[in-house]
């Protein structure tokens, strides 16, 4: 059974079906969106039992020739790298759709774009052909543009255009890179696995140039400093559910691209790039955390904390160790879950109070105990408290970077990796500082009477957030089930990259 | 019994969760459940304790795999040896008494249920770290202890000072935890394991150098500095008294602050492998003991005095560790747990009766609160180090260890701190219980606390009296089971009579008590006068050596400033000038292109058209329609051709 195609295209079918439902039947639209995304999630989960954890290679592969003249095929498959991300995507899509039920304007269009977006996202993660990959990559972009531009905040058009242009700017580099690879390979092919197998054709300058081309494209998505400024704006202006997807899934496309494509295809360039990547990760961590600390808008704070958290993932990747890679991938998942729930929670308070200013609140802990509890768990997870998901992945990322094999030295005797990793740990401290400050200003202290008619979370809101909170705890306490999914793939990936040295 | 030691950790967790989610349906909102659970774990711990006392080398280690990554396997496990057993008893006994005591103290609190859930959770976290068989699990328990303290210190979160104190505790200890975290990373990257026994084994094999071991030990010690409130990370502890008083008792006695000392004792082999680290921690401990004792001299808040004394006593324990007195340090931790819990619970009882924290408003309470008074007396004598109370034995042990280490400066400093301790504790004791009541109204309203509060006090009073006797020999016995030979210094031959140290320490304590008696009871010298004579040091002490101000002005404000500037840079320079600037330039460029397109390129096209027009208008002139003209043109053309092709020179011909 062609599981993967179903997972990817069921939301698209839902989107098509929506077109035939009259505009006024708002609830039907919601139901269709929910059912189709749930179905996709169900299929993704059903793979869980059949997924072979020992097999580092591709599973559930489907391959048909598509445009043979140009070596283009419909080639999809998953391994330990992509499957956890698809799980994340399918889950966050369902929860975001539940979280978007309160959207009242142009509901039909909203869910149409949303389902199309899900197809694009899953598509990117399953594609094993560059042509297909690029199509899905661009398919993601258009729904996002409309979702931000129509249902966003006050500066939505500006944000949407900026997001679109910025990402497109990156895509162009990727396209050039893909074409360069196509023409360099013999026989000409767009097949990613084939290109990776024959990566010895790409030598010398060519390897470095194409690596950098793809890197720019992926770095914008992550986002890696200095390509990050689209992020706070897009996150803040986007409607809640879209921010969840944006932070939860779209950012992972960048790191996924690096791990799936850039690193194995150009191992020499990647290893050469290890120190710059380390420094970029360090900047992401410290810069992101410090800028987040200065924010007074909760959503913006969470947005900047994403830059910090993706920095941890980069740190794990920079070392090219198995521990670091496991940590990076786990961090990607955890960030999706934790930041996803943080955005949903910020949305909850914004829907009620119509403000996200940290200083506008105070003492809500007494009034909204459930909300306070869940928000505190999410914040604690985000600042890396043990027994919650974030800790495991941050620990692995730091450990991976700290035990890097790199012989590079700074100040003549100190290992560069140890030096920057140790400095990066300060990022945890800054993160702690601003999350605790936010909790204190919003939930603790004397109650601000202005909010005396605020209500605690509704059932629907709980349904959209609690699964994420539960997962945060589950991964924090028992991460084995998730790490075992990725371990063998990561192991073979790291060996493959390092084998060339 | 030992096989089921996981229950000791699991039960408080289950109780915490049950109370948190279902407390409202339980008798006394779950308090009964919490107390019973702790009772069971206490009995269990006592059982383990007695088993190990009979056979200290009976070490049990049980572990289950937690998660694997690559070739590495992490584990969750239990290591039950003498050290663990001792800590289990300390934690569960104090926690049990605090649970009972809180029944009366917190009875009117609207968040009573949540309080008990947090309290059980706090105990769980501490036990998790105590039974850990590896550094990672210890770190997890460690951080959860931090979380629990954050929740409990800031329990009355409507009070800004309480929520500030909670945050301060969390962040300050987190600073230390960064060191701990780096230490763990170093250990793992060097040795590939975090299991205590394996780490110890690999260090004995000489896998890492003495220098490296010492540095790692100091990194770990950073964590201990945070949790056990060593200078300069001690600042959170005095503020931590913002929480409910029983919580302070728990934090100051059994959980949280004990964690740091315990961690040093647990990873002592690392410190011993890099001995310079021991020297450093001895000095840190001494400095802490001294600074905190001096700060306690001037504090007027009853809980603050006790908090400073905790910091000071923790310094003592760390000093003991530093000079090779691992068993003595742990012994002091144990006795201190009993009398400090007693002091705090007693203080809680006093506060409950007087509704004030200020010792200068109290006085004469010995008549009103007999039981509290008796209990407090026991604690006062114990902490001052008067024979036969518990503090005498443990303090004496530390002083002896210090003297044995050969560093007489540290020894005299420690003795001086013992003197200071006796002095400020007597001051507190006199002002609260003995002196004339300052505020009649407070005095008249004072009353003895309910039984649930006084019984724990009396139990602890008894423990403060007898713990020294009972445990003097059993603690070293329990701790002797460590594989490495410990207490290298202690084995060195005594060159002084064995009564010397007890005599000196008793003299110091009695002198302190006497001096305090002179000043605060006989009023032979006015305290105010001393304060005004030494006004500069006095103010420095009142300001707690300006540590807080230092952090605010040298770290917090600059960090905030940097954050603000970076945020401005990010939005204004980076985004608006950089990214939008590029966008703007692109638009401008396209406008220029537009102009170029319209004016240059398009005009070029137009010019072409115009040229054709011009050309055709000229050529049109030739289209006259007259055959003669055409013939003339043909002739003319024919002529030109002849010139060009046949090279006929017409001009020559004509000539």
Image: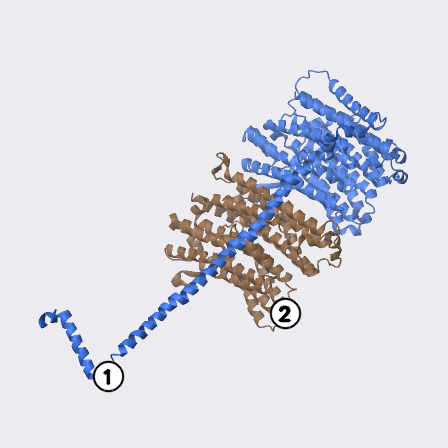
Q: Position of residue B139 (x, y in %)?
A: 64, 40
Q: Position of residue B329 (x, y in %)?
A: 70, 28
Label placed on residue B625: 1
Q: Secondary structure at mark 1?
A: loop
Residue under numbered circle 2:
A28
Residue A22 drawn above or below residue B268: below
Question: Which residue is nearer to you in this view: B70 or B301?
Answer: B301
Label placed on residue A288: none
Q: Quadrant of the C terminus of chain B?
A: bottom left
Q: Position of residue B399 (x, y in %)?
A: 71, 23
Q: Quadrant of residue A150?
A: bottom right
The chain holding disc 2 is: A
Q: Quadrant of the N terminus of chain B?
A: top right
What's the colour of chain A in the image?
brown
Which residue ends up furthest to the bottom in the rendered image? B626
The chain holding disc 1 is: B
Question: Which residue is nearer to you in this view: A296 or B239?
Answer: A296
Which residue: 76% across, 36% down? B304
Q: Which chain is blue?
A: B
Which residue: 52% across, 57% down? B580
Which residue: 66% across, 31% down? B265
Question: Which residue is nearer to you in this view: A299 or A368?
Answer: A299
């Amino acid at each position: 059974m062609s599981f993967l195609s179903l997972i990817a295209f069921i939301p698209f079918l839902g989107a098509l079906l929506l077109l035939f439902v009259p505009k006024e039947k708002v609830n039907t639209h919601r139901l269709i969106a929910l059912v189709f995304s749930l179905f996709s999630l169900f299929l993704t989960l059903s793979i869980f039992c059949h997924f072979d954890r020992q097999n580092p290679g591709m599973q559930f592969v489907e391959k048909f020739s598509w445009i043979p003249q140009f070596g283009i095929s419909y080639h999809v498959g998953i391994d330990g790298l992509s499957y956890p991300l698809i799980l994340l995507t399918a889950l966050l899509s369902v929860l975001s759709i539940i979280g978007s039920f309160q959207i009242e304007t142009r509901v039909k269009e909203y869910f149409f774009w949303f389902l199309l977006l899900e197809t694009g996202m899953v598509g990117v993660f399953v594609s094993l052909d560059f042509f297909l990959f690029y199509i899905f990559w661009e398919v993601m972009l258009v729904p996002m543009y409309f979702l931000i531009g129509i249902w966003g905040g006050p500066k939505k058009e500006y944000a949407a255009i900026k997001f679109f242009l910025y990402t497109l700017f990156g895509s162009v580099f990727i396209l050039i890179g893909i074409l360069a690879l196509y023409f360099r390979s013999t026989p000409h092919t767009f097949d990613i696995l084939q290109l990776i197998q024959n990566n010895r054709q790409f030598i010398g300058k060519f390897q470095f140039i194409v690596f950098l081309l793809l890197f720019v494209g992926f770095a914008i998505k992550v986002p890696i400093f200095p390509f990050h400024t689209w992020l706070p704006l897009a996150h803040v202006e986007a409607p809640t559910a879209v921010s969840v997807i944006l932070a939860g899934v779209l950012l992972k496309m960048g790191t996924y691209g690096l791990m799936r494509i850039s690193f194995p295809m150009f191992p020499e360039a990647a290893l050469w790039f290890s120190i710059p990547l380390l420094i970029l990760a360090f900047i992401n961590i410290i810069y992101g955390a410090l800028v987040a600390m200065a924010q007074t808008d909760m959503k913006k704070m969470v947005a900047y904390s994403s830059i910090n958290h993706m920095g941890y993932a980069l740190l794990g990747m920079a070392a090219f160790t198995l521990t670091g890679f496991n940590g990076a991938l786990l961090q990607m998942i955890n960030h999706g879950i934790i930041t996803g729930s943080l955005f949903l929670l910020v949305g909850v308070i914004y829907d009620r109070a119509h403000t996200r200013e940290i200083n506008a609140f105070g003492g809500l802990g007494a009034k909204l105990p459930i909300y306070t509890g869940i928000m505190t768990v999410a914040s604690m997870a985000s600042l890396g408290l043990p027994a919650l998901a974030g800790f495991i992945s941050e620990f692995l990322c730091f450990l991976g970077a700290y035990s890097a094999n790199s012989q590079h030295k700074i100040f003549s005797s100190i290992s560069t990796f140890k030096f920057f990793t140790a400095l990066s740990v300060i990022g945890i401290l800054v993160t702690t500082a601003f999350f605790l400050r936010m909790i204190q200003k919003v939930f603790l202290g004397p109650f601000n009477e202005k909010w005396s008619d605020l209500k605690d979370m509704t059932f629907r809101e709980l349904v959209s957030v609690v699964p994420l909170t539960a997962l945060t705890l589950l991964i924090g306490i028992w991460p084995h089930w998730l790490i075992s999914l990725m371990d063998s793939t990561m192991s073979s990936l790291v060996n493959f990259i390092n084998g060339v040295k | 019994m030992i096989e089921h030691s996981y229950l000791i950790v699991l039960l408080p967790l289950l109780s915490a969760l049950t109370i948190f989610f279902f407390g409202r349906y339980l008798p006394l909102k779950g308090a009964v459940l919490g107390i019973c659970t702790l009772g069971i774990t206490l009995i269990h711990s006592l059982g383990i304790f007695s088993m190990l006392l009979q056979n200290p080398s009976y070490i049990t280690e049980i572990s289950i795999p937690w998660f694997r990554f690559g070739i590495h396997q992490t584990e969750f496990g239990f290591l039950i040896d003498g050290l663990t057993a001792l800590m289990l008893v300390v934690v569960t006994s104090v926690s049990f008494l605090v649970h009972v005591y809180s029944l009366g103290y917190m009875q009117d609190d609207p968040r009573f249920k949540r309080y008990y859930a947090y309290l059980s959770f706090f105990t769980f976290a501490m036990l998790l770290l105590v039974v850990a068989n590896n550094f990672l699990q210890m770190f997890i328990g460690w951080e959860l202890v931090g979380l629990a303290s954050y929740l409990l210190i800031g329990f009355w979160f409507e009070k800004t000072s309480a929520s500030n104190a909670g945050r301060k505790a969390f962040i300050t200890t987190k600073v230390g935890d960064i060191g701990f975290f780096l230490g763990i990373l170093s250990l793992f990257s060097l040795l590939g394991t975090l299991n205590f026994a394996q780490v110890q084994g690999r260090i004995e094999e000489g896998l890492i150098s003495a220098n490296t071991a010492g540095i790692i030990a100091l990194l770990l010690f950073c964590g201990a500095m945070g949790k056990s409130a060593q200078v300069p990370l001690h600042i959170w502890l005095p503020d931590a008294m913002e929480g409910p008083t029983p919580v302070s008792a728990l934090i100051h006695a059994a959980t949280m602050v004990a964690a740091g000392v315990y961690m040093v004792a647990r990873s002592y082999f690392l410190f011993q492998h890099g001995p310079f680290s021991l020297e450093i921690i001895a000095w840190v401990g001494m400095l802490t003991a001294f600074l905190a004792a001096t700060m306690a001299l001037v504090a007027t808040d009853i809980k603050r005095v006790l908090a400073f004394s905790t910091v000071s006593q923790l310094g003592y324990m760390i000093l003991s560790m530093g000079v090779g007195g691992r068993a003595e340090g742990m012994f002091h931790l144990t006795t201190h747990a009993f009398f400090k819990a007693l002091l705090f619970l007693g203080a809680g009882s006093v506060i409950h009766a007087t509704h004030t924290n200020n010792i200068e408003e109290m006085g004469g309470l010995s008549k009103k609160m007999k039981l509290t008074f008796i209990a407090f007396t026991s604690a006062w004598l114990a902490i001052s180090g008067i024979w036969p109370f518990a503090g005498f034995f443990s303090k004496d042990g530390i002083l002896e260890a210090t003297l044995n280490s050969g560093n007489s400066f540290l020894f005299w400093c420690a003795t001086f701190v013992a003197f200071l301790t006796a002095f400020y504790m007597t001051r507190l004791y006199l002002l609260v219980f003995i002196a004339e009541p300052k505020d009649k109204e407070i005095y008249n309203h004072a009353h003895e606390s309910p039984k649930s509060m006084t019984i724990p006090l009396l139990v602890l009073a008894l423990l403060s009296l007898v713990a020294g006797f009972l445990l003097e020999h059993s603690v070293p016995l329990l701790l002797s089971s460590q594989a490495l030979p410990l207490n290298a210094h202690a084995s060195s031959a005594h060159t002084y009579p064995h009564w010397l140290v007890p005599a000196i320490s008793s003299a110091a304590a009695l002198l302190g008590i006497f001096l305090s008696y002179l000043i605060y009871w006989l009023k032979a010298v006015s305290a105010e006068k001393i304060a005004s004579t030494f006004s500069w040091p006095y103010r420095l002490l009142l300001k707690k050596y300006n540590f807080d101000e230092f952090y605010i002005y040298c770290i917090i404000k600059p960090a905030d400033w940097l954050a603000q500037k970076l945020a401005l840079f990010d939005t204004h320079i980076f985004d608006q000038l950089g990214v939008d600037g590029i966008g703007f330039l692109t638009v401008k460029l396209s406008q220029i292109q537009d102009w170029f397109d319209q004016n240059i390129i398009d005009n070029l096209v137009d010019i072409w058209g115009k040229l054709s027009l011009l050309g055709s208008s000229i050529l049109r002139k030739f289209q006259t329609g007259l055959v003669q003209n055409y013939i003339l043109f043909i002739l003319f053309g024919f002529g030109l051709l002849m010139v060009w092709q046949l090279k006929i020179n017409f001009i020559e011909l004509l000539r």
